[in-house]
Amino acid sequence: MVDLQGTVAAADVKSASVQDAELVINRIHAVSKADAMLPFLVEDAARSEKEVEESQDTDRPFPRLGQELRLDHRWLDLRAPANNAIMR
């Protein structure tokens, strides 16, 4: 979470929903920092069950992501390409 202090200034912005104003930041403060380690990687969420199963006999098997873990961290799971395509 970030706390910003600044002033609103007139602008000509093409790539935002508010196109006639922008925030000129004077001060920024990190209120809380994110955990350094994510619960799982997006790459792990994107792998098929077949890929995970085939890797179990190797020296570096892919982790199995249970449904409960994926649902608890849905914000991260939705970044996997297959899940992200549903939202488009």
Image: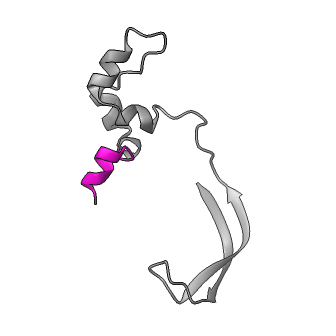
- Which residue occupies 45% across, 31% down? 40
Q: Nearer the viewer, residue 55 or 75?
A: 55
Q: In this image, 13 relative to 76: left or right?
A: right
- Which residue occupies 57% across, 89% down? 12
Expressed as whole percent of the image width and height from the top left, the position of residue 2 reads 62, 58
Task: Locate the C terminus by quadrant.
Answer: bottom left
Residue 2 counted in the magenta span? no
- Which residue occupies 59% across, 82% down? 22
Expressed as whole percent of the image width and height from the top left, the position of residue 46 reads 36, 37
Provide the residue span drawn in magenta.
78-88
Q: Is residue 42 above or below residue 27?
A: above
Q: Nearer the viewer, residue 34 or 47?
A: 47
Give the image's coloring scheme.
one colour
Expressed as whole percent of the image width and height from the top left, the position of residue 29 reads 70, 59
Q: Check the image and name the residue furthest to the right.
A: 26
Total labels: the figure holds: 0
- Which residue occupies 41% across, 21% down? 63
Q: In this image, 27 relative to 78: left or right?
A: right
Q: Is residue 6 above or below residue 38?
A: below
Expressed as whole percent of the image width and height from the top left, the position of residue 1 reads 58, 54
